[in-house]
Image (cartoon, rainbow, N blue to C red):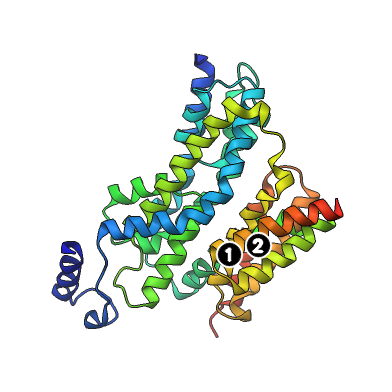
Amino acid sequence: MEASVADYTDSMDSPADNVISPAAEPVAPSRAAEFGRGLREATPVVMGTLPYALVLGAQASQKGLSPLEMPLMAGLNFAGGSEFAAIELWTSPPQLLLIATITLLINSRHILMGAALTPFLQHLPKRQALAALFLMCDETWALGLADARRRAAAGHRHGFSLPYYFGTGTALYVVWVTFTTLGTLIGPILGNVRDYGFDMAFPAVFLVLIAGMWQGVRAARPWLVSLIVAALTYLLVPGAWYVAAGALTGMAAAWFWARPE
Amino acid sequence: MIHPLSLLTILAMAAVTYCTRVAGYLALRNRVLSPRARTVMEAAPGCVLIAVIAPYFVSTAPADLLALAITIVAAIRLPMLATVIVAIVATGLLRHVLG
């Protein structure tokens, strides 16, 4: 528990910090405990990504990616949506510019996600923040953000727990790289995992996270705007534009509704 | 065996993706946000999450829509793991029953 004592005295030593009363701050758990909590709380999310990883690997092997190329992509890129698109477009040899552009389009939501996470990363050294952001995917971002808000509300000085976040990231990263690779090896005998309903784990995780962010109907109005615009864009516009279209319109609505009196 | 162009393509993907991950942080790191901008940033996570799963809300399969409705109720009332299990079981069963 050394770390917790250090954290506590640190907060006592710096009254200049803009904090809720330092005396009221709960004693922080150790780094190892926080890392373990991250691993544990990521488990249901990992369950949801596991079948996707197998399916991606299976599709990759059909497109001629080797059991060496798949872990390289999964491990260096680590962003499932763009990897599905890349595999879909994969030729031998692949069209570099096309795949890079599609990757940018699909992952452009990371820009917004990183912006939303930034207030919670301000207290970290730049190098740590840049390392943490490598592991930022939909799941780790949402878990880390929800946890940071909960901890901030509970009176922790910096809501964001870096070891917790690395715990969630490690769980997802290891499973993603391992099971996409496994998918390239056992793909042909796998059949269609979608039949078993595993794909619904993905929206289920997101819905729980959204429910955890609920702060009343007024605050949720931009989400509804985002949902409607994203759904319509998905139906009407081919490609991956719907996430950016919905999220940006929702944020514009939040901006409009938040205008000063 | 890795084809050089395959390797380059994977590296290009990785570079592009990492740039999207750090862009928001690098742009806002040293900024103090106005209260209005902060309200927008607080709404942003929900906006992104709901937009990502928007396609599930306009599925053409009745089984999937019904399973989504059950999942929403579960998400409001249950913790993460229970919700995920309910979602998978409901979807699997409904797809078998309703096709």
The quadrant holding residue B76 is bottom right
Amino acid under label 2? Val
| Rendered position, B98 above or below B41 | above
| Side of A90 relative to A6 (left or right) | right
- SS state under label 2: helix
Q: Identify the chain of the residue marked 2, using the numbered disc in the image.
A: B
Across and down, in percent, residue B23 comes to 44, 48
- SS state under label 1: helix
The quadrant holding residue A18 is bottom left
| Side of B89 relative to B80 (left or right) | right
Q: Identify the chain of the residue marked 1, using the numbered disc in the image.
A: B
Residue at numbered disc 2: B86
Q: Residue at x 16, y 68 (%)?
A: A5
| Side of A223 relative to B11 (left or right) | right
Q: Is residue A65 visible?
A: yes
Residue at numbered disc 1: B82
| Rendered position, A164 above or below A259 | above
Amino acid under label 1? Ala
Determine whether label 1 and label 2 are within 8 Å by CB.
yes
